[in-house]
Amino acid sequence: MSSAAKTLAEQLEARFGGRLESVTVERGEVTVEVAPKELLGVAEALKAEEAFAFEQAVDACGVDYLTYGQDEWATTESSTEGYSRGVESASTGRLRFGDTLEPTRMERRFAVVYHLLSYRHNRRLRLRVFAEDDQMPVVPSITPVWNGVNWFEREAFDLYGILFDGHPDLRRILTDYGFVGHPFRKDFPLIGNVEMRFDPERQRVVYEPVSIEPRVLVPRVVREDNRYADRNEEEA
C-alpha cells in the first residue's frame, strides 16, 4: 500500500466516519463506497474542502453485477491446443430476447462509479454508489457538484437503465430513437433484440427480428509459460 493512498484513506475515514459504507485501498488506489442518501453531501465535501479538493469528476460509468464472478469458460483447463467452447451458458453470448441469466449472490445489482481528480493534491479517488432497487435503479445525480458528469450520467442511463434523480436532461445519448432495452446490462442479448435495414420498396428504414445465431466470443488468456518467464523474473 502506497503511503499517499493510505494517508487519503485515513483522512476519509476520519472526516466522514459512518457516512461511508467502506473505504478500501488496492493496488495503490482508494475506493470509497457511499449510500445514495449520503452521495451528494459527501461529493460536495470532497470538492469544496481543502483537505480533499477534488475539483474534477473525470468519468462516471454504470456497472451491472448480475453475473459477477461467473465464467462459462474452463480457462484453467485450457491447453496449447486451444480452448473448449463454453462450458455453461453464463453470458449474453448465448442469449436471445426474453432469456434470463442465473444471478450471483451480490446483494445489489447496479452501481455507478465516479472517478475524481484533485489537481491541487495530485491524487485520484474512486467513488461508488449502489442503487437500492434492482428493478428500478435510482441514484442522485451529482451534476449540481460536478456539472461535467452530465453526459456521463446520460450514458449510464442509456446503457444500463440507471436513473439519476435531479439530472437536468436525462435522456438517451447513444442508442437510436425508440430503442428497447439497455445494451450494457448483462441480460441484454449480445446479438440484440432487432436488426435494421433500408427497405428499397418502402423507401425507409425497417426493423426486423434478429436473423443471426448467438455465438460465444473467444477470451484472451495470458498463460503462465516460458514466453513470460523472463518478464516475470524482471518484475520480481
Image (cartoon, helix red, strand yellow):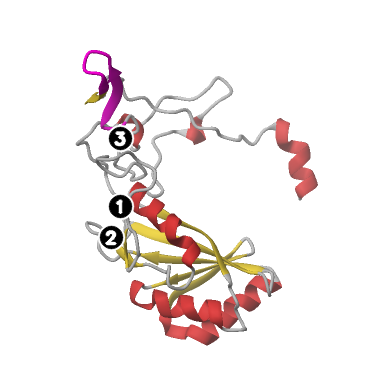
Left/right of residue 90 with respect to residue 53 in the rendered view: left
Q: CA distance from mark 1 to mark 3?
A: 15 Å
Q: Position of residue 167 (x, y in %)?
A: 35, 65
Instruction: Find the magenta span and give its range.
Output: 192-204
Judge the density around disc 1: few (<14), some (14-19), many (≥20) Cα neighbours within 10 Å: many
Q: Say if the magenta span includes residue 157.
A: no
Left/right of residue 98 with respect to residue 231 in the rendered view: left
Asked if 57 appears above or below 10 in the picture, the reply is: above
SS for callout 2: loop
Which image quadrant is residue 143 in?
bottom left
Residues tagged 2 and 1 counted as in contact (Cβ below 8 A): yes
SS for callout 3: loop
- Amino acid type indicated by mark 3: Pro
Q: Position of residue 145 (x, y in %)?
A: 47, 73
Which image quadrant is residue 96 in?
top left
Residue sitting farthest toward the front: 203
Left/right of residue 213 with respect to residue 43 in the rendered view: left
Q: Position of residue 53 (x, y in %)?
A: 60, 77
Residue at 40% from the left image edge and 40% from the top image edge: 71
